[in-house]
Amino acid sequence: MGHSDQSAPQGLSLIPLLVYRQNCLVSGLSGFASGAVIGAALGGLSGGLDAYRLGLRGQPLLQTVVSVAGNRAVPFGAWMGVFSFSRCVLYGAGIRNNLVNAASAGFLAGCAATATQIPPHLWRNSLHLMGNNGIMSGAFAAFIPLVFQAVRF
């Protein structure tokens, strides 16, 4: 009887990890796409409400909605894409602890989402902001599994 293990590869053997990372790339890209859709939807709603409260109507309202939706799509997409990709890679590398995995992936995702909002020539001066947002994002991502473990549905 052969042993067929469908889980993520153990350790850091090169070939299985590369194959597993291809699946992680797909996971990251789908995370980016779904995050961009969520960000655009939330940005469109918040931009529309803010523009309406400011008295904009017609074409100026629509321009504001499209602008805010586009500005929100990239950071949401970056956060979800990097989070999905890094969590998958960490899992494939053998880091199975949900708390450590989620916190690490959240840290990387927070840094990436912050980097999308900072002009490239200011990145060196803004590393503390990226690190701070990464820590907050990692703490939040690590907190969610703990809540679901404590509350059984």
Image (cartoon, rainbow, N blue to C red):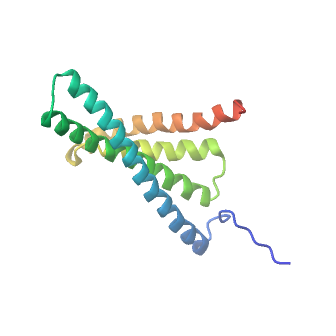
User: x, y percentage for residue 79?
Assistant: 41, 45
Which is nearer the eye, 55 or 115? 55
Task: Indicate whether 87 appears above or below 152.
Answer: below
Q: Which residue is drawn at 22% across and 21% down?
A: 53
Instruction: Check the image and name the residue furthest to the right.
Output: 1
Q: In which quarter of the image is residue 117?
A: top left
Relative side of 91 to 37, left or right: right
Instruction: Check the image and name the residue furthest to the bottom.
Output: 1
Which is nearer the eye, 4 or 110? 4
Which is nearer the eye, 85 or 37? 37
Relative side of 25 to 78, left or right: right
Number of numbered discs: 0
Task: Indicate whether 73 appears above or below 20.
Answer: above
Relative side of 56 to 6, left or right: left
User: x, y percentage for residue 138?
Assistant: 50, 39
Q: Quadrant of residue 2?
A: bottom right
Q: Residue at x 23, y 37 (%)?
A: 65
User: x, y percentage for residue 153?
Assistant: 71, 33
Q: Residue at x 52, y 34 (%)?
A: 140
